[in-house]
Each structure stands twice: as C-alpha cells, then as structure tokens.
Amino acid sequence: MPRRQYELIILRLLNNNETCTWGDLKKEINRSTLSIYLNRLINNGYVEKVKFNHYSITSKGENRFLELSQNKEKKIVLNFPPNMILRKRNYDHWILWTLYHNSYCKWVDFIGDPLNINQSSLSKSLNLLMEKDFVRKENKQYRITELGLEEYSNLLKYYDLDRQSILKAESKRIKEITKRTLKFFEKYRIDKDEMKFRFLNILLKLPFEKIISPDSVIEEEDFNKIILFLSINHPDKFPNYISPEQFCKKFNIKQEILDYYIYLIAEKKIYAVKFFTLEAENSKYFFHTQEKLGRMLSIIVEDHITKLTYLNRLHAEKTDGSFKLTLDTTVNAILDEICENLFRNELRETLRRFLPSYINYLAYKIEKEKKLVEPSDKLEGLIWHEIQILENQKLQFDNIKEVERAIKLNPKDPELYYSKSKILIDKNQFNEALALLNKMLEDFPEEEINIQMKIAYIHKEMRNIEAGLDIVNNLIEKYPKNNELINFKALWLGYMEKEDAALQEIQKLIEKEPNNATFYDTYGEILMYFENYKEAIKKFQKAIDIGDEWYFFQTYIKMGLCYKELEDYELAIQNFEKGKELSAISLTDKNTKQKWLAFAEPFIAEISQLKDDFYKE
C-alpha cells in the first residue's frame, strides 16, 4: 500500500474521533507500519499525543487529511455550505465557507454543483477576497488565509448556525495562532499566564496579515514583539513601565519599526479594535475596547452620562437649580468609581485629562447612525469663532500658567481672559470659567454681549438649558436691534427641539436681512436637525451663493451629511471633499476643524464601501 494511503487511514480515524488509542489504530494497520507512520505524522505536526496512549489530529493534520482525500483515485466529495448559507446569494460567504472546510479549491469547484456561481460573479468575488487578503491563489489553487479565517468566524454570526459550529471555527483559528506563539513565548521567556493571556487577547484581534504590504519591512516575530510591548505597558501594570528604548534593546527590535507600528495600531485605526493611550509620568499605557478594562470603562461612563441626561431632563422644569447635574460633577463621579474599581488612584489626574476625549468617542460611536450635527454645534462655533481666530494668530497658549503670565503682562486685554476661559472649558472646569467670565463683566462692560453668550454656552454644556435661553432673551430685550442675538435664539430653540419656534425666529430674521449668509446657514441647520434634508440643502446652497464666510467648510460638510441621508452618495462625497479642502485654509482652530472632519471622513469611507457593495451586486 502506498505511503499516502497509510497516512490517510490514520488521519481519517483521528479526524472522525476526538482521540484514538494505539489499539484503535492497530485494528487498521499492523504494529510496525503503524509505528513508522504515526511517528512521522507526529514529527510533521499532523498528529499530537494529548495524553498517555491517546492521539489527536491537529488543525494542520485536518488540512493534510483533506488534501490526501482529494488526491485519492476515488475522490472524496468536497464539503459545501449548508442550505441556510446557500439561501442567501452572498458569493463571498459561499467561497469562504468552502475554502475553510477544504484544504484548497479550484476554479471549477465553484462553478459546478452545488454552488453554480457564474464565471463573472466568481471572478469579481475571488478578486475582491484576494484584494482583502482573505484568499490566496497558488498554482491555480485557492486557499483561505489567516485573515480569511478571522472573516469566516465573523460571517458565521450572520446565520442561524448552532453555537457549536461557531465555537469550533473560532477554536480552529485560535489553535493555529497559539501554536505559532509557543516558540515566541519560549524564546523570550514569557512564562506568566496573565501576560500570555493579554498577549493572545490582542494578537487574536490584530492579525499580522492585515498589517503587511508589498513594501513592508516587518517580520511576524517583530510584529509579535510589538504586541508584547502593548501587553507589558498596560494600565494594570502602573507604575511599572518599559520605555521604547529599553524594550528595543532588550528584545532586539529597531525603534523606528516599533514606533511606526505602534502608531499604525493605536492611532491610524487600521484594525476594528480601538486602542486608547494613557500618558502619565513620561510613560504611555495602552488598552483597547474589547478587553475587560475597556468594556467595564465603557459601561461605567455610559451609565453616568445617561444619568446626567435623564435626571436633568426629568428636572428640567425646576427653576431652583435642584437636581441639576453638570458634566463637571459627572466626570468627578466617574473618576471616583473607576479609580476604585479599574485604575490605580495615582492615575486620577491622567484619567481626568483623558475622559473628555473618551466621552466624545463614546458619544460618536453611539450616535453615528443618528443626528450628528445639532444647532448647538453652530452655536458653539459662532460663540467662539473670534477668539479662535485670535488664538491662531497670537494667543498660542497650551495651559493656564502660560495665559496667566500673559495676563500679568497685559491685564487690560480681554482676549487673554477669553483665551483663559476657553482653556478652562476645554478642561471641563465650568465653575472656574463662569467665575472668570462674571468677573470680566465687571472689568470689561463693553464686552457684555460676548461675555454673556459665552456664559450662556457654558450653561448649555452644563445642561442648564433654560438658564442659557434666559440669558439670550435678556440680551435681546436689552439690544433689540442686534439680529445676531436672534440668530442665537433660533439655534437655541432648535437645540431644545422646539421646531416651530426655531423656524419662526429664523424666518423673521431672513425677512429682515434677505442677503445674510449666516442666517440662511442657520435655517439650513435647523431644517437638517429636524430631518428635512431637501429643504436644508436649499438653504445651505443659498448661504454659499450669497457670500464667503469663515464657516463654509462646515456648511459643505453639513450638505454632505444631508445628501448622505438622501442616499445621493456622489454629491455627498463632493461636498465632504469640498469641506475638507476649505478647512485647510480656514483660520478656525485645530480642534474645531478636527471635529468637523471627523464627521466627514468616516462617511467618505462608508459611502465608498456602499458604492462598492452596490456595484458588486
């Protein structure tokens, strides 16, 4: 009997049973032959001895078994997807399923029964899968890649498959990856189970194949070292830390490679897993959304933000200020809880700096399918625009100490105080900002409107919405000819979801000043907020036709969002790109630009994907 036949008999028995004993195998093959071929299969990694006198097939052995089966003179039929997958005409899923359950397939396997994929669709699907590195082609044979295994695990979730099938698929992928890491652990003496688990928990979510490209200079072992660096420098390990320099010296990796790929993973978002960085005492610690710490932090923060929203809405009608929560008090409550349960208390001030951006991340993640642009966005822009221009031109202050030194040198310059209040608000120190602005009312009475509008804005941020509107109404009563104040009121009413009142105010303004671009832009924003996208586009376009304003990069992005909602993707992308182009030459501060570009860029990527899906169909 040919050698392959002995291998096939042993592998078939092991493939059909969880384990086999020597006695089980000896029933099919004589002792001396069995000894030779079983040892050969073990040495090649196709079979493993799981315990005394018990042998099991490996995932590599499963592939070898399928390969030998298909090469038999009496060819075994390929495994094809079940009906529940074939019912949905998704050729990508059909192909991945078939490749996963067979060691390789040829072109003819997909165009024949039972798949019967037409050649044009097959060519398109295979090319797309190969572009995404889910499938590779070698000698006219198609095989699933490491990335393809991950994608296969994901696609199972779309179907009503039993949990055991999903677990088996994921188990196979994990088995392949963990086997390759054993030598890495041994080589670099990674012996603590906690570190091994954290390493694998990251590695399984960041497949090496996704990061390599034709011009890559990174090997898989170096990639594993980068994952190790992320695993070592975790918040749980604070204050222990290994610097990039120390790590590179200890683990023999070039620092430019480490720095570049840490940047790709943590900043460029090339993976679906979102990483966060905590900077403390010249050290950086990393954690991600899908680990225990990331999930628990998300739950705690969302719970407190929800509490803030619900209770303030519940008591919105009260005028005595009772039960009024603020973002400031909420951040303190979050810090109390997470420093007790998740992080070391020594990281408290680091976390205080980190939380505002984290809350913005959660808000965007949760709301990205809802209304992303509210009247309050424009309100904030109008309130702060002048001070932002001044900051770009001459007030480049990074912290309170710098601006306070400038105030000592020129105590009569109100713009310096505005700059200080802006820093305080960015740090969510609302009470301190209010105290500063109230003092400015005494020292700079000529600045009353600007100061009061900034005070109103802070009340809005603190969810004291009615108090902010009262300030606007009082200013209108005192300065009835100031139409900009009425514009603010229209935006404020829109923010309070009083659609009719908001539209009534802005219509009155346009009747007074029919050639004011800002008022038409406000009109469009209110219409957009209440999902009247077609009319909103008309108003935005009218604003652009009238003149050139500093905020028009935002107007184009808002039009892009409207077109996106109307599923006119070509015009959506055109307006997003125009908005990006204008933002590059705008004097608006960097944070505001980034905020608006964060609206545009994800949708450009999303719309491109939708177009690809459309043409694929």
Image: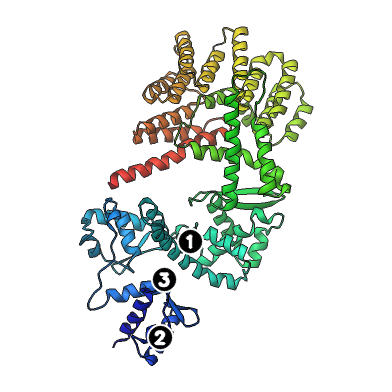
Q: Residue furthest bottom?
A: 32
Q: Nearer the viewer, mark 3 or mark 1?
A: 3
Whichever of labels 3 and 1 marks the residue nearer the N terminus, that label is: 3
On the image, the x and y values in percent for residue 575 come to 41, 32
Which amino acid is tagged 2? Gly
Residue at the image position 71 percent from the left and 42 percent from the top: 349
Whichever of labels 1 and 2 marks the residue nearer the N terminus, that label is: 2
Crowdedness of circle 2 by 10 Å Cα count: few (<14), some, many (20+)?
Answer: few
Crowdedness of circle 1 by 10 Å Cα count: few (<14), some, many (20+)?
Answer: some
Quadrant containing the N terminus is bottom left
Residue 169 appears anywhere in the view: yes
Query: In the shown orientation, is residue 585 left or right of residue 17?
Result: right
Circle 3 sits on which residue?
Answer: 59
Which amino acid is tagged 3? Ser
On the image, the x and y values in percent for residue 289 come to 55, 49
Residue at the image position 48 percent from the left and 14 percent from the top: 501
Whichever of labels 3 and 2 marks the residue nearer the N terminus, that label is: 2
Q: Which numbered disc covers residue 436?
A: none
Which amino acid is tagged 1? Phe
Circle 2 sits on which residue?
Answer: 23
Determine whether label 3 and label 1 are within 8 Å by CB: no
Circle 1 sits on which residue?
Answer: 208
